[in-house]
Amino acid sequence: MQKKWWKILSFLLLTYTIIGGFLLDVPHLSILNETIRNLYFHVCMWFGMMILFIISFVYSIKYLRSFNYKNDIYAKNFAAVGALFGILGYATGTVWASYTWVTDQGQSLGSILKEPKLIGAAIALLIYAAYFVLRGSFTDIDKRARISAVYNIFAFAMLFPSIWIIPRLVGSLHPGAPGSDSGNPALNFNDIDSRLRMVFYPAIIGWTLLGVWITTLKIRLELLRDKTLIHE
Amino acid sequence: MISRVSVLIKKDILLELRQQHTFYGILLYIASTIFVLYLSLPESPEANVWNSLFWVIQLFVCVNAVAKSFLQESRGRMLYFYTITSPVEYILAKLFYNIILMLIMSMVSLLLFYIFLDNPVTEGLTFTGIVLLGGTSISLVFTLMSAIAAKAQQNAALIAILGFPVILPQLLLLMRLSKAAFAEVFREGAVLQLAGLIGLMDFLVIILAVILFPYLWKD
């Protein structure tokens, strides 16, 4: 067990997130009400997913620069845990949507599924699903590592416009769409109530660290299994 | 370098002319797909449906037209190219050749759509421009996907799996942009903004292809 401190930090932050997230005071807005507490879980999942995908992307670049098999294992596992966070983001999102968009706003399932952010997230998950299908179609590990690194880099570079630009161009039920006065609560410091900020930012760090922690466990397991293949 | 790229493009065109069956095969694919659409639709579709159908057909035509660009190259021939040219020149030639091929196919399918499924387009010239832009975008992405799939020793199915999520954002933008040709009023500058965004993404694909293809090429 090396570098214990950030694991402890992750544990403390998540304990704080769960206790503080459910007990601290939150602003009461119409429609949202207490569901705003989901901010500490739902939005953090997407932050965690993006950060893990970015790490995976960086390791793919490192692989192509060094052809060190270790970097391929890193890239693969960060992508896998990132995809898991994406699925959890969907799961927490459905809970939130069912209490706000469905019950209070009466949105139909069709209009919710056409949400630009849902589409963006679906594209991200499809890309990483395709990444794993591609990996599965090779038997030669060096070739698999090289070709999948190329796909990972290409797909990631194409993913950015879809996730970050398109939702800003078209109307959306999420906050941050053009024409709404809600601003961008996820990234703009002024658009979010200070009471929420108290828990939100620690929660992002906590969940992301947890994601990295899970990934390092998977990586260590795989490194032990493939010990004979890695030449330092 | 430009001269060598153009020689490679000429080589591909020459191959196409010598093996005309593949070219006519794709033309037949377009014609029969649109004919099936024509028979399966009870009446001419309204503009929005027409637009969606058109772009989906474009996508499948492109998968079929571009798929063979790398799959057809035998191992020995790749080795030969490896000795006489650089990967950057090779991929650029493939990209441009596939753009040309896809533009021809786009025009054919547009024409067939007009014939079989009526013509809800009010701004013909704008729509033709958008179709050319879209054909370019789709063919660029699928050329690179074809290069990846060829390494995986897989059939065209893998190209679709790899390419569809990547092309989706651009395809959605294209469908949105096409509505400018269906008498939908956009706010001023929005059409150019969208077209510019798609153009930028095309440029990004070319740059990524040039950077990444050398890694695919080595074996």
Image: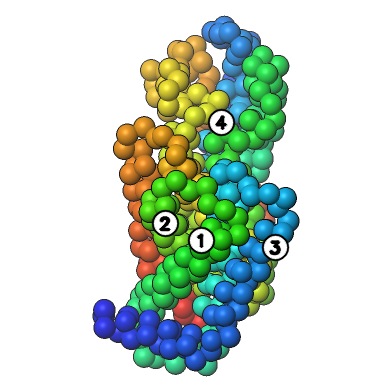
Give the spatial CA distance, label 3 vs label 2: 23 Å
Give the spatial CA distance, label 3 vs label 1: 15 Å
Q: Are marks 2 and 4 on the same chain?
A: no
Instruction: Indicate the position of residue A53 as horizontal and vertical percent values.
Output: 52, 48
Badge 4 marks a residue whose secondary structure is helix
Neighbourhood count class around disc 1 (C-alpha, 10 Å): few under 14, some 14–19, many 20 upward: some
Compare residues A150 and A203 and report the one nearer the observer: A150
What residue sits right under mark 2 in the picture? Answer: B128
Decide which of tag 1 and tag 2 comes sooner along the chain.
1
Instruction: Determine whether B54 is above or below B4 in the image.
Output: above
Compare residues B166 and B16 and report the one nearer the observer: B16
What residue sits right under mark 3 in the picture? Answer: B36
Give the spatial CA distance, label 2 vs label 4: 44 Å
Decide which of tag 3 and tag 2 comes sooner along the chain.
3
Q: Amino acid at mark 3?
A: Val
Which label sits in the foreground, 3 or 4? 3
Instruction: Determine whether A160 is above or below A170 in the image.
Output: below
